[in-house]
Image (cartoon, rainbow, N blue to C red):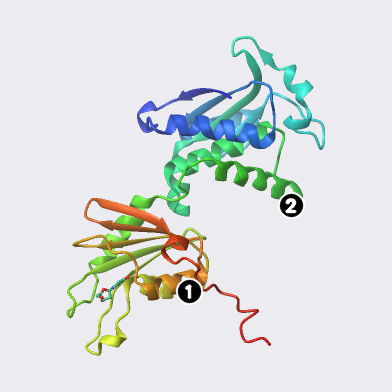
Amino acid sequence: MILDLECRNPAELREDWLPLLHTAADAAQKTEGVAIPLAVHVLITDDEEIHRVNREQRKIDRATDVLSFPAVAYPPSRHAANAQELLEQEYDPDYGAAYLGDIVISMDHVRAQAQEYGHSLERELCYLLVHGLFHLFGYDHMEENDKRLMREMEEKTLSDIKVEPYDRNELIARAKAAMEYSYSPYSHYRVGACLLGKSGKMYTGCNIENAAYGAVNCAERTALFKAVSEGEREFTAIAVATEKFLGWPCGICRQALYEFAPDLMVIVACKDEVDSMPLKELLPHGFGAAPDKLGKE
Ligand code: THU
């Protein structure tokens, strides 16, 4: 897909995001299943400008994250994949492709939402682009069924591209901060953890030792137990920070985490060194939660 990108403040658009945005746009087209060449104009701006566009074009007097202006007026229950002849009418010789329409994205909202959901900036930006593209393909989210379909298309697209859905640097920074609270007078091995819940909330923990050694609690389980005891049961990733060498979670923590999040990504960090591995690889053939089966005949 031709992405005609216009950026009001080019300094805030990192160079390595450009190939990612192109990949996201191509993945969206593939998910939708449109074979002909397409072009889209994307303006990346701030809250002030998107507010003005929203007021002038849609009579809605507020800023928002993303706005889309489709070139095609899709008849009910039709969208790009089954309205190719309508798209062909939008052929634009300047692009040498069918012009889908315009998307406007506010970087102020990208930043705020990335922070709120624990997403990376590039993940949030890609999501808003993909969301805007599906509007240009004729999807909307006014009714429950339509909304579900649109979300499915978006999720399929995002899972097809390699964009880490969270900001690992943020998780690592929080794990390192939590390490400062480590109570480890016996081992002097300080550990901090930051566990990211599906809600976007982050839970930190440190290791807490005891004169009776068996009462020691690892940083990972401190974070996990804090989270579960506050109602969160699904998790995306955990960062574990140590001081001297990379410290992968112990066997007990792997098992405790596996109960709630077999698909968890485990990130370990020590000074400037970082490594990561899915929990499923750290605990092969893990003993999984099946509360409905356990205890039954
Ligand atoms: N520890 C953790 O916090 N996480 C692990 O995964 C491994 C071990 C802590 C427990 C104890 O306070 C210290 O490290 C030494 O075992």
* Mark drawn on residue 228: 1
The C terminus is located in which quarter? bottom right
Residue under circle 2? 144
- First in sequence, mark 1 or 2: give its number: 2
| In the image, residue 98 above or below residue 26 | above
Element under disc 2: helix
171 horizontally vs 51: left or right: left
The quadrant in which residue 104 appears is: top right
Mark 1, secondary structure of its residue: helix
Quadrant containing the N terminus is: top right
Q: Residue at x 60, y 28 (%)?
A: 56
Amino acid type assigned to the residue bearing label 1 in the image: Val
Q: Mark 1 Cα within 10 Å, few/some/many (few <14, many 20+)?
A: some
Residue 139 in sight in this render: yes
Q: CA distance from mark 1 to mark 2?
A: 30 Å
Who's the residue at 45% across and 30% down the image? 19
Residue 290: give x, y in percent of width and height: 60, 75
Which quarter of the rendered image does ligand 1 occupy?
A: bottom left
Asked if residue 144 lies left or right of residue 10, the reply is right
User: Is ligand 1 within 8 Å of the beta carbon of the residue shown at mark 2?
Assistant: no
Q: Which mark is residue 18?
A: none
- Image coordinates for residue 289, horizontal then vertical, percent: 56, 74
In the image, 208: left or right of 124? left
| Residue furthest front as drawn | 285
